Amino acid sequence: MLNLEERITRVWHQEVRPLVADAYRCHSTGTPRAAIVATWTAVCADIIHKLYQLAEDGDGTAAEVVKRIERARSTADAEAVKTMQQVEGKLLQNALDLELIDFVEHRQLERLQQDRNLCAHPSLRPLGDVFTPSGEYARAHLVAALDALLVHPPTQGRKAFARYTAHVGDPSFVGHADYLVQMFAQRVKSNAWKQILGIAAKHAMLELEVPEDTGITASVAADRHALCLIAFAQHDRDAVREAVTKAMSTFNGLPIQKQLKTIRRLGTFDVFMDGPCPRGVDTCSCRYAASVRVADCCS
């Protein structure tokens, strides 16, 4: 189990790391109120950095928030301060909407936000009592912030899957392996990653039909998904192999001509060529040449 110092070194954004270190120093020196305020500052900075990253990736919701931040930074007057306060008040909801955190993590960080207000504004408590959190309470907030948000890149779930399918159907589709891995593998939550691999393997191997409004044919879509699948193997070969294996049983039931098209598409992809034979043969040799009937060894 990682201790706090090790977790801090894993904070995703380098500019947020010193802010998290400040919160840890406050906790270590016995000033829990300051630690909670510093932890919330780090959370806000982290979400803003991730919003900028998502905006660069083309997310419209993130882009709208970034525009407000940029307008505030360009004026730096009393109105700008008010704008940033409004932005800060909605950051957790933005993070939830963009799937940077889930609803449980949202609740944890919302409690941090509330406690930060109690720490920074003691007059909020009734009868003038001052909020006096314990050191362990401040530490729990820091650990929750690290585990829920700070150590993770700007990964998404359903939105990332939707962005992947939109990219495959885009006229300006980019098939460069490094780009595909960066956009649709490194910044995707685990469940969405499995969905992306599943749809890529099915289209690449089975040449599924695509909606007419996509503007591309099923064959073109299959070719693009194949490029993505091959690129994704550079990032997580085992996960790609699992997706290919799941689609293989359906592939073996396809008409021969359709199987041959898939072999021409994926014939140099070792993960596909080494896929399991439905009869349990270790190597299905009929897959090594498009001129051979694919079903011969399995008939």
Image: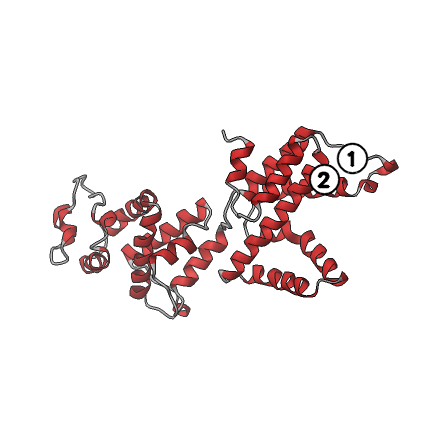
Residue displayed at 77% across by 61% down:
78
Quarter assignment of residue 146: top right
Which color scheme did the rendering employ for the protein?
secondary structure
Q: Residues within 10 Å of mark 1 (few under 14, many from 20)?
A: some
On screen, residue 25 above or below 17: above
* Residue 155 image position (x, y, % from top left): 49, 49
Residue 220 x %, y %: 31, 65
Marker disc for residue 294: none
* Residue under numbered circle 1: 131
Q: Earlier in the sequence, mark 1 or mark 2?
A: 2
Contact? badges 1 and 2 (CB < 8 Å): yes
Which image quarter: residue 129? top right
Left or right, residue 280 beside residue 181: left
- 80, 125: nearer the viewer: 80
Tag count: 2
Q: Is residue 61 left or right of residue 258?
A: right
Residue corresponding to mark 2: 115
Whole-percent x, y for residue 264 in the image: 20, 59
Calculate the distance from the C-alpha at mark 1 to the C-alpha at mark 2: 9 Å
Residue 139: % across, % down? 63, 32
Q: Amino acid at mark 2?
A: Asp
Taking the spot 19% from the left edge, 58% from the top edge, the residue there is 260
Question: Is residue 295 visible in the rendered structure shown here?
Answer: no
Residue sitting at 65 percent across and 63 percent down? Answer: 68
70, 220: nearer the viewer: 70
Residue type for callout 1: Phe
Q: Nearer the viewer, residue 247 or 135?
A: 135
